[in-house]
Image (cartoon, helix red, strand yellow):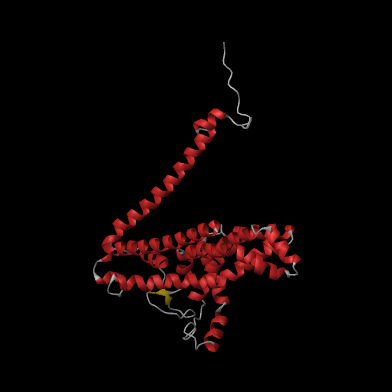
Amino acid sequence: MPVTVAADPGADPGVDTKSELSGRGSVGDVVFRGLAVTAAALILVALAAVFIFLGLEGFPGFNVDAQHYTGQGSFLGLVVPLLFATMYAAVLALIIAVPFSIAIALFISHYAPRRIAAPVAYIIDLLAAVPSVVFGLWGAVALGPYLVPAHTWLANHLGWLPFFSGQPSGNGRTLFTASIVLAVMVLPIITSICREVFAQTPRLHEEAALALGATRWEMVRYAVFPYARSGMVSAVMLGLGRALGETMAIAMIASPKVVVSLFIVGTQNPQTIASYIAQGYKESTPDRLSVLIATGLVLFAFTFLVNALARWIVARGRAK
């Protein structure tokens, strides 16, 4: 006589109990899971391979003949000015880009009508697809000469500041111009992340602030910004990581020199690691090449730390 097993009255009739108990889904789920795990593993393998390559090929560059260190005497004497210039140019770009990025993100998410917000967001996102060499050409050929009067005005009226104290450039190809170009390049990254974070602010919080008599700006200040603070910080950090690794814009616009200097409107500007590698890679001996790879290892590690810090800030904000 067949035995009938009573069904669980609390079970969902639309769920396959056998599949749920066995922990296995359909064939499509298994394939997708395998592809996802494989892709993640390949990314980690590629990252480790790059680090190993830079470490093996660049290790000899830490201790070669002093003539290969561009007159700086040692690797530390070379990499410190380069790292300073890399961070300096990126911070200048963020000072310019962050206010505009936050303002554009707020305009898209809270102020603009939908028929205007969507095209503006689309155009901002398209900026990320423009090759860096195009931005470099624009900065060197068009923006630089246009900013020559601004360089002269800054040197004449604000020369008491170390940023503008000196002879201004006559062609506009300065670190100041390069920083503006970098700001345009990182703007879509910061704007897109801030826009998404602002849009996730709970609607009830915004309506409660308006119901209590707050203006639109007060609602943004007291309801949106506190909620989106961690996301804004992570957006800025990701933009910083993008600016740190930029090569062509700096190499094509500025006239760099391995030096620690705050002067940004002159013809001689501090050189970043990326532009240093790009300009010295063609004509290089084995020892010189190892020095370039060693500086690339420093940039890789520094950029990795910046992006890891940004991811940690994002995870911390989500946990809160």
- Locate residue 33, reporting x and y percent: 49, 39
Q: Nearer the viewer, residue 275 or 81?
A: 81
Q: Quadrant of the N terminus?
A: top right
Q: Nearer the viewer, residue 21 or 305?
A: 21
Asked whether residue 281 appears in the rendered view, the answer is: no
Whether 116 is drawn above or below 83: the answer is above
Residue at image point 54% right, 60% down: 317
Q: In screen coordinates, is 283 left or right of 243?
A: left
Whether 320 is drawn above or below 73: the answer is above
Q: Quadrant of the C terminus?
A: bottom right
- Locate residue 200, reporting x and y percent: 64, 57
- Locate residue 232, reporting x and y percent: 57, 64
Whether 9 is drawn above or below 229: the answer is above
Numbered marks: total:
0
Residue at image point 32% right, 63% down: 294
Asked whether residue 50 appears in the rendered view, the answer is: yes
Furthest residue toward top: 1
Residue at image point 30% right, 62% down: 290
Q: Quadrant of residue 289?
A: bottom left
Q: In screen coordinates, is 295 left or right of 202?
A: left
- Locate residue 245, reporting x and y percent: 45, 63
Whether 232 is drawn above or below 32: the answer is below
Q: In screen coordinates, is 268 left or right of 102?
A: left
Residue at image point 56% right, 85% down: 153
